[in-house]
Image (cartoon, rainbow, N blue to C red):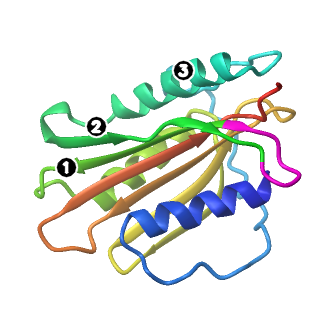
Amino acid sequence: MRIRLFASAALVLALTGCTTPAAETPMPAPTLSPAPAAVLNPDLVPMALGVVTEEKAAAEGNRLGDALEALIEPGSIVNVSDESQLAPAADDLPPYYVVYRTYTLDPAVDSLTLAQTIVAILLQSGWTSYDETNEGGQFLAALSGGAADAPWFALVGGDASVEGQSVVTFQIASPDVTQ
């Protein structure tokens, strides 16, 4: 799963305008934050699926995606690109479902601050941060949430590197799908 997380991060960076190839680095240790006294947004907490089927993973992934989308002011959304799909098994990795949405926003929206705010809400809703970068007008955070034996992974990005454009993207990867 760790390889999948970094492959996904590279894809997000590539799609949000970063052209520098991702350097191969070991998986950083998670930054453990104290458990919130109360979950800020229960809709952002991944539900246990038991046996993870494609249908269950798609339904839960899209529910989480919709909950993240609800954090964006609807009037600021200019376009939504949704490339959600079952990622096929590859090499020794089983398939998983991925919700992948890119939001083109009104240029007046500060996409970096919005992405950082979404990450802060996820952290206060029980997710764990693995890594964050914020340079060159691009912000990217990698997180995990849900049960330790069947975690969900999320990448949240903001891109303000192109003048006059504001983009927020997120990718949510399910636990491994049983076939």
Amino acid type shown at disc 2: Ile
Q: Residue 148: which quarter of the image?
A: top right
- Using the image, tell me which numbered label, if any, was put on residue 72: 2
Query: Magenta residues, as a range?
Result: 90-96
Amino acid type shown at disc 1: Leu
How crowded pointer 3 is (Cα within 10 Å; few <14, some 14-19, many 20+) is rated as some
Residue tagged 3:
42
| In-image side of 40 versus 163 (left or right) | right
In the image, 52 versus 134, the foreground residue is 52
Amino acid type shown at disc 3: Pro
Q: What residue appears at the point 64 percent right and 17 percent down from the top-left corner?
A: 55
Q: Secondary structure at mark 1?
A: strand
Tell me, yes or no, whether the two marked residues, 1 and 3, touch with CB atoms within 8 Å: no
Q: Earlier in the sequence, mark 3 or mark 2?
A: 3
| In-image side of 116 versus 143 (left or right) | left
Q: Main secondary structure of the magenta part?
A: loop
Q: Distance between the Cα atoms at labels 3 and 2?
A: 17 Å
Q: Earlier in the sequence, mark 1 or mark 3?
A: 3
Residue tagged 1:
105
Mark in front: 1 vs 2 = 1
Q: Secondary structure at mark 3?
A: helix
In the image, 14 versus 70, the foreground residue is 14
